[in-house]
Amino acid sequence: MAADLGISEATYTSWESGQAEPWGEHFYNLAHHFKVPMEVLLDDNFDYELYLMVLKARGTL
């Protein structure tokens, strides 16, 4: 995963363990990798199921 994101293993491990958080372009790269809006990564209360329903209703999923 770290290689896919262009970061070191140590950096990725620090994100996973909660010792550090991604910032700047790393948010974009993570969202792009997982194919989710950046809000999913930024908002603990993001309703992903609702997001999927909206995409389906728009015909974009």
Image (cartoon, rainbow, N blue to C red):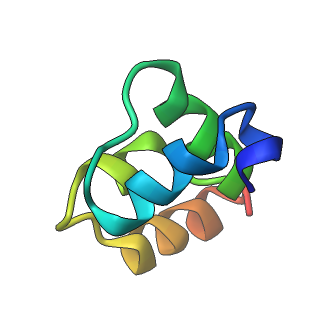
35 versus 29 height, above or below: below
Give the side of residue 41 with respect to residue 18, left or right.
right
Q: Quadrant of the N terminus?
A: bottom right
Pick the residue in front: 28 or 50.
28
Q: Residue furthest bottom?
A: 49
Pick the residue in front: 32 or 15.
15
Quarter-wise, where is residue 28 in the image? Answer: top right
Pick the residue in front: 7 or 24.
7
Q: Residue furthest front?
A: 10
- The residue depicted at 58 percent of the width and 53 percent of the height is 36
5 versus 1 height, above or below: above
- The residue depicted at 71 percent of the width and 48 percent of the height is 2
Position in image of residue 34 (x %, y %)? 67, 57
Q: Residue furthest top?
A: 24
Q: Quadrant of the C terminus?
A: bottom right
Quarter-wise, where is residue 20 in the image? Answer: top left
Give the side of residue 49 with respect to residue 57, left or right.
left
Quarter-wise, where is residue 40 in the image? Answer: bottom left
- The residue depicted at 31 percent of the width and 43 percent of the height is 21
Position in image of residue 55 (x %, y %)? 59, 61
Q: Residue furthest right?
A: 4
- The residue depicted at 48 percent of the width and 64 percent of the height is 54
Position in image of residue 47 (x %, y %)? 30, 71
Count of numbered tags: 0
30 versus 45 height, above or below: above
